[in-house]
Structure formats: C-alpha cells, structure tokens
Amino acid sequence: MGNFSERLTHLPVKPGVYLMKDKSGKIIYIGKASVIRNRVRSYFQKKSNLPPKIQRMVSAIDDFEFIITESELEAFLLESNLIKQNQPRFNARLKDGKSYPFIKIDTAEPFPQVYITRKLNNDGSRYFGPYANAGSVRKTLGLLKKLFPYRSCTKHITGKDERPCLDYHINRCVGPCTGAVDADGYNEVIQQVIMFMEGKTDDVTKKISQNMHQASEDLDYERAAILRDQLTAIEQIHEKQKVINVSGENIDVIAGAKYLDQSRIEVFFVRKGKLVGRDQFIMQGTSEDSNSEILSAFITQFYSQSHYIPSKILLPEKIPDIEQIAVWLSAKKTTKVNLTVPYRGEKKRLLGMVEENAKRGLEQLKLKQIEEGSTEEALSQLQEALNLPRIPRRIETYDISNIQGSNSTGSMVVFEDGKPNKSDYRRFIIRNVKGIDDYSMMKEVLTRRFKKLNENISESNSWVKIPDLVLIDGGKGHLGAALQVFLELGVKDIPLASIAKQEEEVFVPETPEPIILDRSSQALYLLQRSRDEAHRFAITLHRKRRSKSSTASKLDSIPGIGPQRRKQLLRKFGSTKMVQQARIEDIASLPGFNISLAGRIKERL
C-alpha cells in the first residue's frame, strides 16, 4: 500500500466517484461518495475497524484517483457505469455483464428485423432484455417466430422478388420481399411482436381477432384461417402464463441467495398481472457483502442495460441508495418507479416464491461447482494415467463415419477443462480416400488439421490452438495412422492416445499393452464423453450428406434430368418435396421443360 498522507489532506469536499488501483495500474475497486474526502480517508484509518474484504482491498492499493460530480445522483450513475465497464474484482458485479444478449427490433428500418444482439446502441431500435444467457434468448426468439410472421432473412427488401422463401409458404412470413405486404402491413406485425414482448397479450389478441373478422367479411378465407391459427397459438401461450393477483400491474420481483463469492439473483417478470417470464443471474465478488448491498448493485447494473423498466420493483428488504435508485429509474422510464418491500398479501407470497427459486438455484450452483471439482480430479487422473507432461486442459478427439465407404466424414470435437467447446468443433468431408479405409481417412483428417499449425493464421483463429492431448476413436491401428501423420508433419510435444470402444482400452505410443482405467474413474468417464461426442458429431454430418445424396439421386434417376435441369428445379421450387407438390403446368413452364417431362417427374417422385 502506498503512502497517501499528503494527497488525503487535499481531497475535495464534493460528491463524486473514486477509483482504487493496484501496482499494475488496474482498477480494483470503484466507489461513490457524497463527500470524496471523508469516504477515501476512511479507508486509510485504523485497518482493524474495516471489514476483512476492505482490508484486503486497501492492502492492494498502490494509487487512486477521483472524479468530481455535480450531485450524489450523478455520482451514483457514474459509479454504476464504471463498474460495468471495468469489472473491478473487489466490487459486487454482474458476471460477464458486458455481453448479455438482448432481442433487438430495428424499428428505424422500413421492414424491421428481430434478432439477437449483445450491443446496445442509441439508434432508435427497441431492445428487450438483458437475458441471462443465449439459450434463454433463443428460446424466446423461437417462440416469437412461431407466433408472428415477421421476416427472418437479412436481404434488402424491394418488394420485387419473384419467388418467396419457404417461410412464406408455411405462413411464417408475410412476404414483404415479393410485395405481398407493404411496409405498413409488415409494421403492424412488428407492433404485435413489441406489444407481446411488453406483456400486452390481450391487446395483441384483440387486434388479430379484428383482422380475422375483417378478412372473413372480405371473403379472404385463407387469410382468416391463418389469423385464426395465430390467435389460437397466442391464446394457448397466454393460458399457460400464471395469473398473479396484482391488479394487472407491471412488476419485476427480485430476490437473491449467496454462496461463497457468488450470489444467485432470481428475477420474475409480471406483465399485466401475469407471470410471463423469469431469468437468473450471477453476481461475483459478493462474499462479504450483505444481501441488501448485493441487490442494490444488481439493480443498478441490470437496469442500466435494460430498455424496459416496470412501474414497480418488489424486493425482500430495503436496499442502500433506494431513493437515488428510484429517482434514476423514474427518470429513465419518464414515469414514477416504486421500489417496495411487501409485508403481506399476494405480493409477499409472490416474493416468497422468487426467494425459494433463488435458493433452489443456488443449490444447483453449488452442485455445479462440486462437478467442476470432479472435472479437475478427472484431468489430474488422466495426466497421471497417460503420463502426460501437463494437465490436458484442451483435448481434441477425432472420429470417422462412413457406410460402405460412401459419404465419408471426419469430426474433431474439443473439450476444454472437461467441457465441450462447440465453437471449436470442426467437420471434414473426406476428399482423397475411396472405399472403406478408416486408417487412410483418419490420416487425411489429421493431416488437414495439423498442417494448419504451420500456416500463417490469425492468432484469433482456433486452428492455432495446440491441444494438450489428441484422442483417436479406435484401437492400435488408428493410433498408428495418427502417429505416422505426426512424424510426416514434424509435429512434436503433442501427446497422442486412442480409445477402443468394446473394452474401453486406451493405447498410447511406445507402450505395447493397453492402459486399463478403472471403470468408475473420472478420467475414463471424460475420455468416453469426448469419444461419444466425436462420434455423434461425425455421424450427424454423415446423415446429412446421405440425405442430400438420396435427394439428388431421386431427381438424377429420372430420364431427361441432368445436373442443369436438376439445378433449375431446385432453384425454382426449393426442394425435392416442393417439386413433388408443384403442378405439372408450373414444372413445364421452366425453360427446356415440357408437359411430357413434367409428367414424368411427377410420376417418378
């Protein structure tokens, strides 16, 4: 800790924010104060009077700086933004708070898209979120696409396209690309999406019902049927949403539970008196913070990113800075926002439900951390059993899939710290090997992969990552093929092993006898998971290729259909199934086709 006695006497007697830094200049703590001098000096008084966490923080301080603000509210806002930006280790902070996903609707465009983004821009678009993870936002997006026929393409809309995509044919898009609907009609769909996301389900169903009856009066029975199905789907979702007796209010209900240095925060979203969703978040660096302090930090960081703020937020206890937070949220929403602690009635019961979910979620977090301990045990066991020079943090596993030598594929799956890293998975279509020759196919795959190590590739490309272990799905022969590739390419210091399926024997180079791992060992379980995942990944591509090949062969088997005509058919109709469903006249209208050929196609399909 530095000597700051002279600087401490000259600190300003004004509100603001202070930033504590360590020897490397990294910000380790950010705080706000109504009087900067008093707050900063308090850290450098008698250390025994400070909480243990603050004592450790003060011991690490090598420098500090401050920013004067006009008011305490401005200091509060600045502190929240700086914590989100710098993620100081001694502050309670949202885990990975910079990259939470949102649903974005670019309403500034004439034909808005609805998609996932991790960037918030002040561009006039509507944002919904943040969501705790990509899985929950994708689930919501999938639901929206089933309920509302907005476009999922990224093309420039002119209204002059000749042929719409499959979404239009299955009533999943209103077809603005072909001019089937103009900008006003399309934006009516988008407004329904926005109202649905805001919890205004009754307004949405009322509007769709009006449109359905109007279509029926206009004798447009096809459109009326489509709207009827849409209405039914939305009402089914609406019925599943739990009714909460809170007089049709828009409320967020927030509670948390703490374990070691992390806290699990549970948020229930009530819109128009119905529970429409929930999400869970992790706060880090909370070991010595009170529950009220953790909730205060969460609310400031969560709602600084959220574009929607409810009129009421229910909390289990009063939090620090509650008045300032209420003023800030009200200014952000432009109408009054209340943060309240319910003591009785339906709202108290609802809060109890959220607290119970937070506790249960915390139990899952504990179990996950215990599992991670098992993963470390597995990696250590594996290092010892295979005599590896280092813990196998990155394991690349390879497999080959083929039937009678056709449509052969290879796969590479990656486990990092015992977990699949799917963004680094790779598939290989076998190019140079004909017939059934697993060893040669494995050699081709490994050659193509490890040649990348000698190529001039960007550091951000996953090909440059060097595995701590290369695992082959197979026995001694497969291991020998892999070893030959390594020798030919001059690959050194990357350990090799193979695992045979039946007896779960593990082979390594220069060891004639297989290594037999205990059937109950974590190390064997990790190898099995890696091997099985590589097999699943390889066979998925193989099935796709077989299906595609089967589709192509159906058309190819028809006399008079060569590669060019097959391409014409698929370009026009999109798939073999759509060709099968097309009218003979439509097929015959293609250049180079006639009624006779069209009839033959329909007959064969």
Image: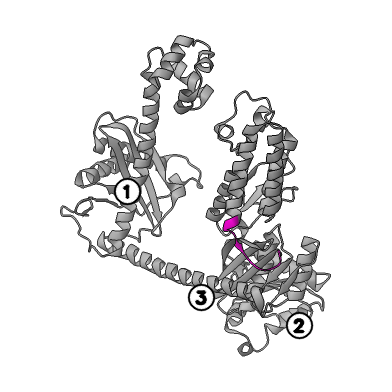
SS at mark 2 in the image:
helix
Identified by mark 2, the residue type is: Asn
Q: Which residue is drawn at 35% across and 58% down?
A: 392
- Region of the chain picked out in magenta, as a range: 239-248
- Compared with 343, 464 (above or below) is above
| Percent of width and height locating residue 458 | 51, 43
Q: Is residue 327 magenta?
A: no
Instruction: Choose the circle earlier in sequence order: 1 or 3.
Output: 3
Q: Which of 85 and 8 is in front in this view?
A: 85
- The residue lying furthest to the left in this view is 513
Identified by mark 3, the residue type is: Tyr
Disc 2 marks which residue? Answer: 38
Q: Which of 527 and 41 is in front in this view?
A: 527
Q: Which residue is drawn at 30% across and 40% down?
A: 400
| Percent of width and height locating residue 412 | 37, 45
Can residue 39 be seen here? The reply is yes
Disc 3 marks which residue? Answer: 259
Q: Is residue 501 left or right of residue 85?
A: left
Crowdedness near tag 3: few (<14), some (14–19) or many (≥20) residues, C-alpha within 10 Å:
some
